[in-house]
Amino acid sequence: MNYTFLIKGTWISLLAVILAIIIYITSVNFNLLGLFGSMPSLEVLENPESEVASELYSSDGVTIGKYFRENRSPVAYEVISPNLIKALLATEDIRFEEHSGIDMKGIFAIAYYLVKGDNRGSSTISQQLAKNLFSTRSEKYEGYLSKNGLMRKVIIKTKEWITAIKIERAYTKKEIITMYLNTVDFGSNAFGIKVAAQTFFTTSPDSLTIPQSAILVGVLKAPSLYSPVYNPERALTRRNTVLAQMEKYRYITSDELAVFKAQPLALKYNVENHNQGIATYFRTVVNNYLVGWCKARGYDLYADGLKIYTTIDARLQQYAEKAIEKHLRFIQNQFYMHWAGKNPWVDENFREIAGFIESEMPRTDTYRYLKARYNDNQDSINYYLNKKKPMRIFSWKGEKDTTFSSVDSVRYYKKILNAGLLSVEPETGHIKAWVGGINHKYFKFDHVKQSKRQPGSTFKPFIYAAAMDNGYSPCFKVKDEPVSFYDEYSGTTYTPQNSDGPSTGETLTLRQALARSINTVAAYLIKKLTPQTVVDYARKLGIKGNLDAVPALTYGVADVSIYELVGAFSTFANRGMHTEPVFITRIEDKNGNIIEEIVPKKEEVLNEETAYTMLYMLKGATEEKGGTALGLRRYPNLWGDGNEIGGKTGTTQNFSDGWFVGVNQNLVTAIWVGGDNRSIHFRDWQFGQGAKLALPIYGLYMNDVYGDPKSSIKKSAFKKPAGYSVQLDCKRFNNAQVVDSDSSGSNPRIYKPQNNLEGIN
């Protein structure tokens, strides 16, 4: 036998194989003739892209929400538990620190394991990262030869090897393992270790225990198959396998293995969604704003990892939500008892509205769906609307499972009262708390900005602001007696009445009249000033809705939003400067670069003296005899340390809307309570007034705010302008001293009302 020839042939064959492998790998790397498909470029490898959730932060640094398709929030290596890294290495890549992207020993071991019937892979963490992060198996990287099934697998594996080597050259081992754990899918829409730790255990990545780490690493093999939520038995078996690997490589002892294997899964499962957490309505409002903002600037809100810094104060937000929940529970029970055995949808004479529920059904999503599905066939629509089915419903005692038809559901929810609250820092316009309703999961409609309702007597301060700015004084006296308005077009006479009974004939200062919310005195001022003047002042103060210049402004009949009302009242506390409320301060990209800063719009609409005088007037509700906000005195934390609070209650006709606006130097808050339909309300003043429906929410809320030593809102007196000249000592005042001024606020002149103390005929 010619051994020389055999040896030479062997070497030639070996060199040919090596050369062929080199040519093949080079061809794949450079996509020769387009046969193999492209590879991730060096630029892509150095700047990897993955969908990152945009995050919403409160002004005090709390993450209050996210926007995502894939819920992913990257973390640094330093905040990943060593337990997790050890579990990962023991299970997925024990020689991670030794190889350069490809574990040759692991590759040669594949045949051995296949013979044993163990279909395990040999992909290193770097190879898995290449697959996950750079989508090496996606269609965009396919070539002509990839159309063949077997060849496609070989090419894909080759690309992953090449990409893994490039990754190892571009990044450190710590960076690779961090990128891997930040991008991998753990199931349950949890992408990356930060979200996975929160989703499955309500904890952070640095706090993961050994058993928790083993569960999460076990899930990676197949997130659906080994889900601890949907397949707990498989997940438990897989966790124990991971623990055994950790014991094999001496990351844990045999005794620890026995202890850990005996433990249950102990999940604290909680999938993040937009109905959970604080400020749910606010987050939806911000989402709607950001979608438009991103579209105009070329960003993807759900993938680009934006950092949105809001004005919301997490502490105040929680106190606001707590106050609404506590009071609405109480009010809802009263409402049920008040209407026991009767339906609360009634007309102006308190008679039940026939066919009310039937008229509401076409507004529901269910009705619209059935209408489209059954092509307007009313018989089919009615059949399914009345067909009972299992459903979960809201209640103040927690979610309840019941059997309802769609009609039953509407009837049930129409009996539930709702609420809205907005708090604004008057000087900056920063919104500190936004509660759009009682439960975002079941009631999506936002009652802060989306809803507009009649403000009742919370509109009166605009009448009084016009009066103060046109020469009247808080000490000016008017009789509580009827004031009539003649309409020459219709030939009718309109005479506003007081909400709590007939006129008393008592002589009141304007401060006393506002404190008691006397309609006849407001009517007196409207007649003196003209309705158009009042409308003009309301507009200047920020009321943007439809305002008719009519005497009925006394009752606050023009619809307004909580958002508008807070902005208007904030003008008084901000020395006459109207500041448009804002909810975002800045937006950063995922690298921390500022791409937008929000500056609120400001405009001086009242002089400082008038603004301060209105604060003094609003204080009357908490100080004057018969003041509608005296109920705030029972909340101890609101008082003392020189703190001053003004307020105004509001109640609409038939008690459909209950309002309260609270004003102090550092925070202005408006609250509304009522039914989703104006026809749903209490029947009498005892239960339906703003002082009973809305004011207690303010008291509960501010009692917590002031009671928290870490609160950003501190007690304060109202800031009096230097050289303030308005006479507030009513013992030294008579109506002849009223000073008027022209529309510019200058050229003061003595103004003598035509019917001083005599009322108006």
Image: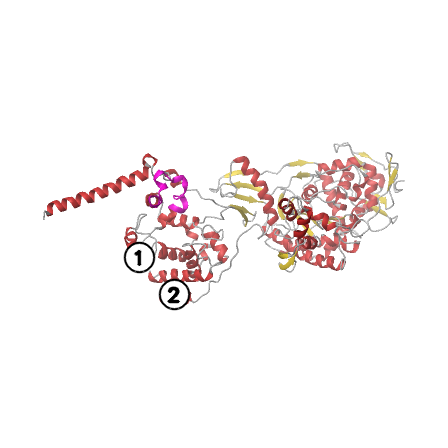
Left or right: 390 as drawn, with respect to 649: left
Count of residue discs? 2
Could you tell me residue 388's position as x and y percent? 65, 56
Q: Amino acid at mark 1?
A: Tyr
Left or right: 603 as drawn, with respect to 65: right
Determine which of the numbered discs, if any, sits on residue 399 in the image: none
Q: Earlier in the sequence, mark 1 or mark 2?
A: 1
Q: Which residue is mark 2?
A: 257
**Dominant secondary-structure state across the stretch colored magenta:** helix
Q: Amino acid at mark 2?
A: Leu
The magenta-colored residue range is 130-153
Q: Which residue is mark 1?
A: 113
Q: Nearer the viewer, residue 560 or 312?
A: 560
Left or right: 506 as drawn, with respect to 188: right
Residues tagged 1 and 2 counted as in contact (Cβ below 8 A): no
Regarding residue 663, the answer to whether it shows in the image is: no
On the image, which quarter does residue 723 sit in? top right
**Quadrant of the drawing holding the C terminus:** top right
Q: CA distance from mark 1 to mark 2?
A: 25 Å
Around disc 2, counting alpha carbons within 10 Å, would you say few (fewer than 14), some (14 to 19), or many (20 or more)? many
Is 731 magenta? The answer is no
Left or right: 702 as drawn, with respect to 4: right
Could you tell me residue 711's position as x and y percent? 60, 52
Where disc 2 sits, the SS reads: helix
Around disc 1, counting alpha carbons within 10 Å, would you say few (fewer than 14), some (14 to 19), or many (20 or more)? few
Regarding residue 302, the answer to whether it shows in the image is: yes
On the image, which quarter does residue 262 sit in? bottom left
Tell us which disc is closer to us: 1 or 2: 1
Could you tell me residue 553's position as x and y percent? 79, 41
